[in-house]
Image (cartoon, rainbow, N blue to C red):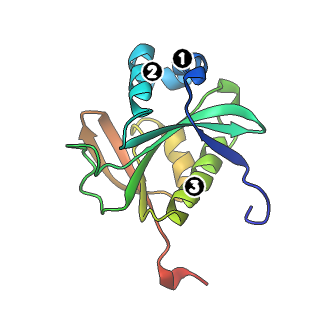
């Protein structure tokens, strides 16, 4: 992929995306893991102007296919992942359309986006699927994430996973 253009494009969420986000958040495969649609949309809207979280739309072949957000746990007061080293960024992702689930997009998006964050200076990327979300855990493992521990926070139970930047000695 290094020789060609990126497979996915990432752009900031715009107000025009809210009807699509509302539709996605109501889909059973997303609703199972996220909160009420109106609450989640309000949270995304708030994130659009926050310093700690950046909400994004993932596009593939020119079409929006997923919601992704990344955040710095050290910028949010009392965030449960402040035990991670400075330079850690957290990510969350949901594939929007049910017909695109299980096709490898999740792990491919995460792999590409994590590589971009690490190239930009992040030292660790963390992700925290619900321990019962086996499909997500498999996708993140496929993208190179490894299990750290199981946590419980205000966000609920988490199968806490991380992907670390390669060490200088690992480069060939």
Q: Residue at x 65, y 50 (%)?
A: 108
**From mark 2 to mark 1, how far is it between C-alphas?**
7 Å
Residue under label 1: 22
Q: Residue at x 27, y 43 (%)?
A: 76
Residue under label 3: 143
Going by the image, does 52 lie left or right of 17? left
The relative height of residue 63 versus residue 80 in the rendered view (above or below) is above
Residue 131: image quadrant is top left
Residue under label 2: 41
Given contact means CB atoms under 8 Å apart, are the residues at marks 2 and 1 in contact? Answer: yes
Where, quadrant-wise, is the N terminus in this rendering? Answer: bottom right
Q: Residues within 10 Å of mark 1 (few under 14, many from 20)?
A: some
Q: Answer with mark 2 or mark 3, whichever residue precedes in sequence.
A: 2
Q: Answer with mark 3 or mark 1, whichever residue precedes in sequence.
A: 1
- Toward the left, the furthest residue is 78
Residue 124 x/y as whole percent:
41, 61
The relative height of residue 171 versus residue 38 in the rendered view (above or below) is below
């Amino acid at each position: 992929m290094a020789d060609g253009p990126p497979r996915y494009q990432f752009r900031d969420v715009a107000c025009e995306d809210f009807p699509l986000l509302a539709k996605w958040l109501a889909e059973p495969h997303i609703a199972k893991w996220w909160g009420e649609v109106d609450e989640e949309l309000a949270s995304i809207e708030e994130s659009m102007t926050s310093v700690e979280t950046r909400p994004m739309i993932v596009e593939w072949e020119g079409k929006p296919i997923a919601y992704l957000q990344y955040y710095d746990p050290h910028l949010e007061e009392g965030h449960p992942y402040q035990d991670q080293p400075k330079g850690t960024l957290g990510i969350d992702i949901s594939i929007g359309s049910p017909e695109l689930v299980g096709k490898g997009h999740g792990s491919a998006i995460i792999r590409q986006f994590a590589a971009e964050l690490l190239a930009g200076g992040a030292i660790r990327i963390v992700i925290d699927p619900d321990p019962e979300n086996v499909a997500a855990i498999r996708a993140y493992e496929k993208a190179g994430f490894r299990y750290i521990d199981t946590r419980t926070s205000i966000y609920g139970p988490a199968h806490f996973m991380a992907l670390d930047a390669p060490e200088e000695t690992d480069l060939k």
